[in-house]
Image (cartoon, helix red, strand yellow):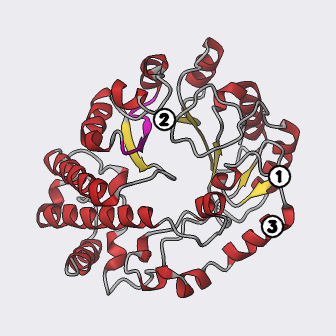
Amino acid sequence: MITNNCNLKCSYCYETGKHLASANVRAIKKVLFEELSSNEYQRYVISFHGGEPFLAFLEMREICEWVWGNFTKKNIVINTTTNGTVMKPEIKEWLAVNKHRFQIILSIDGKAEAHNANRDNSFDRIDKEFILSIYDRPNAKMTVTRDNLPNLYENVRYLYDLGFYPDPVIAAGVEWQLEHDLSIFEQQMQKLATFYLENKGFILGSIFNIPIHKYSPLFRTRGDGFCGTGQTTIAYDVYGNKYPCQTFIADLNRPYDKQEIDNIFCKLQNIGEYYTSSPCKNCRFSISCSPCFGMNYIRRGNLYALDTDKCAFVRSTIVATAKLYARALPNYQEYAWLKNKTERQIMHLALGVKQILNNE
């Protein structure tokens, strides 16, 4: 968490109590040195979060260049998620020089009307042209709310045509009206599926990035969909305090309680117990779904307090993905996202599709 400061007031932002604090560079270097000196992993991803990260550009630049200078033999990827509205000349110059080792994820919800409805009328302030000029199809994180849900497909197409790789994410903490909203979501997913079926050379959108093969009864290591929070993912706030992931830092008014956070880490290390004793135990979709433990903790005060609205959207997404694969698999060699699969992988995908859709 490079800064708690932000220049926008997005309606769906899950962070509360924002203030001007930016990272203690010395503290962040210390924790990064400890993490990166380990040989436990072959690859590391450092993600700078905010607030708006580029409001702390000097701190972010210093940390990046320190990492690049001290860990030359490590496989390290660095990225940040930005609203794209504070791209000063010195920031642009630095990004252009380091585009091969520093990636940007742009927060943008689609066309101007869809974006401005929730993101502080900021569409015209986003330096889209610059970002597209230095990156090849950069990621665009779209937050899906009740306002823009009916135009999800249209907004994905708009961003794709601009040159971005759209990544729609269902907003957390929104009061959904499932009887109405879920059917709209399913219609939009059908339109998106048809788009990828008709454009066979495109890489499949991340919203359909579901491990369908794990549903195959012959696939041996099915496991669960645990996201890795507190294990392969950890986060540090601007002071260097350790959390299981960035979502646990969302309430900036909450003082750091090391004993409480250590207890959460302990629970997450034994997460298998959750999947054998919680409502997820009897859910056939838990193979590819992870509850947001951070949002459960921040919003509902309990690591295991499920957001049942999210469950409904996850189920719908998995079924929509299975239907997409069912339509593509008979001619799988024609699709960019399937043609390099082995026959065994195709078999598991086909069996996974059958397992999911036989229950629909």
Q: Which mark is residue 107?
A: 2
Q: Quadrant of residue 5?
A: top right
* Magenta run includes residue 266: no
Direction from residue 246 to residue 348 in the image, left or right: left
Q: Residues within 10 Å of mark 1 (few under 14, many from 20)?
A: few
The amino acid at mark 3 is: Glu
How far across and down, in percent of the image, does residue 106 sit?
A: 49, 33
Q: Would residue 324 be visible to someone looking at this image? A: yes
Q: Which residue is mark 1?
A: 255
Q: Residue at x 75, y 40 (%)?
A: 67
Q: Residue at x 54, y 87 (%)?
A: 276
Give the label, 1 or 2, closer to the camera.
Answer: 1
Taking the view exactly as shown, the residue that stands out farthest to the top is 89
Classify mark 2: helix, strand or loop. Answer: strand
- Toward the viewer: 205 or 3? 3
How far across and down, in percent of the image, does residue 281 sit?
A: 48, 85
How far across and down, in percent of the image, does residue 25 sit?
A: 83, 36
